[in-house]
Image (cartoon, rainbow, N blue to C red):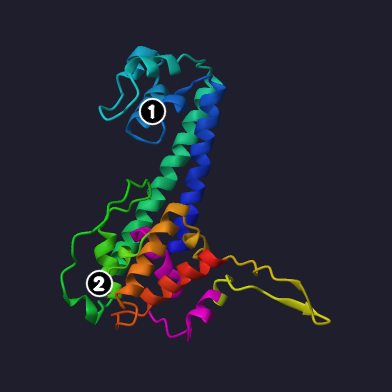
Amino acid sequence: MIRHRANLLRYRAAHVQHIQKILQQMNFKLTNVISDITGVTGFAIIRAIISGEHNPETLAIFRDGHCRCSLQDIIKSLQGTYLDEYLFKLTQAVGLYDFYLKQILDCDLRLSEFYERATPSPSADKPLKAPAKRYKRVSQNIPFDLRSCLYRLAGVDLTQVDGLSALSIQTILSETGIDMNKWPSVKHFTSWLSLAPNNKITGDKIISTASKKTPIALLRLFALPPEVYTTVKALLVLSIEESMLNTVLPWPILPLLTNLLVSSMLC
């Protein structure tokens, strides 16, 4: 189900690119003043154009109050060509975007039903604390409290791992499952992710050490930006100094994730 949802997101993203391409053909510069055309301001203007409104000053009124660009900038960006063939293509592209948006919503509702039926972990008897870190708004947010659902399922708040959001944790659990005993050690886990070197030896000579190619969607979640690596390194040093890594954790994936982050930094 999680992989299916990821595919729907990719299909929807393709139609966002189609909308951007059509706006360029219409000589609109809307993408220069609005960072996300699928946001409140962008889609309000696009839907008004489809409905027949072609006056730039009238279209600029649909600007949301939180939009950073000025009214005059939006008016200048809407000085384009309203040809019928462009409007027809724009209408179809928006329709396809709405279709996949509805499919993603149906998928999220099915996921919500799954979490309600899932047996909660015995370790999830304590109330979930407020998140200690803030995340930027993500356009892929789902319409229910995913963090609480994952806490009930896993028994520990995995979103406290730096660089991993609730959506990332959901993808990880969908690939690995709850039972981590399938991998006797961290080395087995990293090898399953194809992070371990794939040494090819012939005649006592190593001809290649490249890692194996893998279609596992989990792998790209650990391709973290440099600033996250710096934070993880600092936290690991602090944890080692306080001897926290030797304590018994409520779920074995926490040390696995920690060691995996270290392994991915060394690769």
First to last magenta residue range: 163-190
- Give how far across and how far down residue 248 sits, in percent: 29, 83
The crowding category of the residue bearing disc 1, from other C-alpha atoms within 10 Å (few below 14, some 14 to 19, many at least 20), is some
Q: Is residue 195 visible?
A: yes
Kindly identify the amino acid type of the residue bearing the numbered disc 2: Arg
**Coordinates of residue 212 in the picture (x, y in percent):** 65, 70
Front residue of 204 and 197: 204
Magenta stretch: residue 205 in it? no
Foreground tag (1 vs 2): 2
* Residue 152's disc number: 2
Counting the numbered discs, the total is 2
Residue at mark 1 to residue at mark 2: CA–CA distance: 40 Å
Judged left or right of residue 90, residue 64 is: left
Q: Farthest residue to the left: give it.
A: 127
* Viewer-closest of 65 and 107: 65
- Please tell me which residue is depicted at 80% across the width and 82% down the height of the picture: 204
Q: Identify the mark at residue 47; answer none if there is no mark.
A: 1
Where disc 1 sits, the SS reads: helix
Is 215 left, or right, of 157 in this rendering?
right
Q: Who's the residue at 47% across and 69% down the image? A: 262
State whether residue 96 is above or below residue 2: above
Give the structural element (helix, strand or loop) at label 2: helix
Give the x, y percent position of residue 81.
52, 15
Which residue is located at x 35 percent, y 23 percent?
69
